Amino acid sequence: MPDEVERLPLFPLSNVVLFPRVETPLHLFEPRYRQLARDVLAGERRIGMAVVHPDHLGEISGDPPLLPVGCCGVVTESQRLTDGRYNIVLLGEHRFRMLGEDERDSERLYRVARVARLEDPYPPGERDRVARLRANIAENVVVLIRRTQPEHAAALDPELFAGVDDATLVNSLANTLALPPEEKLRLLEAESIPERYARLASALSFWRAELEESGGEERGRPH
């Protein structure tokens, strides 16, 4: 359940989904997002990443409707270019649900939302289930890489993912694997770590089945 309400400046995109514990590089070049970068770097360094509603992708240069669940991130690295653009690295902190947007004044170019913080619970009783899902995901990731990027197969470590905690692993894979944005958003919307594992395992099993049906000819999908 939401337990904290806050205000976040928004950076909406159509094809990037930020996850907690994961770093994502971003390039800010529009005037409104240059202003956003200046403001957040002078303040709390926090940005809310939101996803544009798929029915309104053609309106992204304006203020299109946004899907309600996003992820708050903190700027860990920044570079201001000579022409005023910014390169930043955003580290995901926590998920949120948008409650509404503040009215924009004459000075502020970017959007600001009131959001409710969402936690990612991990009940102790689900550990065994997650262990099974984790093993299934690891197997499918290895198979998919071998079939889509065989040039990288030799570098696969038999202890793939060993030593990475469950929350970091599922979020990192959800971010890194070349799943469609709508699938990544479905993973972000999962209301617990075990549910995110279940959704990722299902997505990878479906992807593997597609490859097997097509003779394994698809290339380049895993990053």
Image: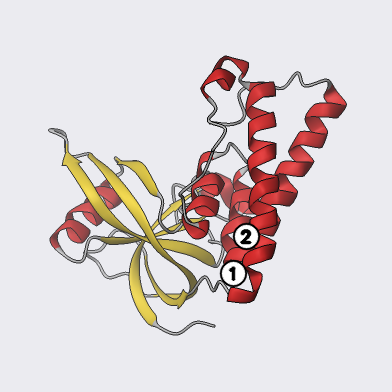
Checking the image for residue 192, the label placed there is 1
- What type is the residue that disc 2 sits on? Arg
User: What x and y, as percent, mark residue 4?
Assistant: 40, 83
Q: Nearer the viewer, residue 131 or 34?
A: 131
Q: Secondary structure at mark 2?
A: helix
Q: Position of residue 124 (x, y in %)?
A: 58, 75
| Relative side of 213 to 138, left or right | right
Task: Give the image's coloring scheme.
Answer: secondary structure
Left or right of 172? Residue 181 is right
Q: How many marks?
A: 2
Residue 121: percent from left, percent from top? 54, 74
Task: Say which residue appears at 64% left-offset and 32% top-offset.
Answer: 142
Residue at 41% x, 51% y is 22
Q: Depth check: 92 or 212 in front?
A: 212
Q: Quarter of the image holding residue 146?
A: top right
Residue count near mark 1 (Cα–Cα under 10 Å), binned few <14, some 14–19, many ≥20: some
Give left or right: position of 22 versus 76: right
The residue lying at 62 percent from left, 66 percent from top is 127
Percent position of residue 165, x then y: 47, 56
Q: Quadrant of the N terminus?
A: bottom right
Q: Quadrant for residue 208, please give it.
A: top right
Label 1 and label 2: CA atoms lie apart by 6 Å
Tell me, yes or no, whether the two marked residues, 1 and 2, touch with CB atoms within 8 Å. Answer: yes
Mark 1, secondary structure of its residue: loop
Q: Is residue 134 above or below residue 43?
A: above
| Residue 150 to residue 98: above or below | above
Q: Does 152 appear above or below 133?
A: above
> What residue sits right under mark 2 in the picture?
196
